[in-house]
Image: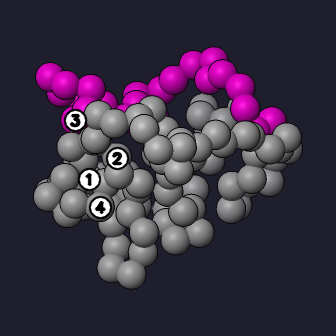
Amino acid sequence: MSTEQNSLYVSGDRLQIPGLREDLPAAGAVEALSDQHRLTAPGASMVTDWRLPAGFMPQPGKSPLSYHHNPERWRLEDSGEYCRLKCAARGQEFVLDLEQYPGVSEWLLTPGLLS
């Protein structure tokens, strides 16, 4: 395997999310997870079937969630409040530019996820 494909990401000391006003550590463990922040869709038969806030939905001219460039993986739910993603099984961490997707920052900052 080429070393060009291997990456190591090191966390900073403090969490930096657009709109975050609290001073929080950049790494740690989630103490409790609410249904609001669960990625796997309710009733899904596979953990790769995700239900996300519509703010995650790829937009023209913006970089989608890493490893999820194929538009066939995405669909907007009828309510328009959520989208479904057939999540790539590859990897544990995916990257999304929160400056391009500010609605996701709002979701991350809702009570219960970051504290």
Above or below, comparing residue 89 to residue 101 in the picture: above
- Front label number (1 vs 3): 3
Q: Is residue 64 left or right of residue 98?
A: left
**Magenta range:** 24-50
- Residue 69, numbered label: 4
- The C terminus lies in which quarter of the figure? top right
Q: Amino acid at mark 1?
A: Cys
Say which label, 2 or 4, has the lower sequence index.
2
Q: Residue 52: horizontal and vertical position, in percent?
A: 34, 46
- Residue at x 60%, y 32% (from the top left corner): 112
Tag 2's secondary structure?
A: strand
- Residue at x 38%, y 63% (from the top left corner): 64
- The N terminus lies in which quarter of the figure? top left
Say which label, 1 or 4, has the lower sequence index.
4
Say which label, 1 or 2, has the lower sequence index.
2
Q: Which residue is mark 2?
A: 52
Q: Is residue 43 magenta?
A: yes
Quote the CA–CA distance across marks 1 and 3.
Answer: 11 Å
Q: Which residue is mark 1?
A: 83
Q: Is residue 51 magenta?
A: no
Quote the CA–CA distance across marks 1 and 2.
Answer: 5 Å
- Residue at x 19%, y 53% (from the top left corner): 73
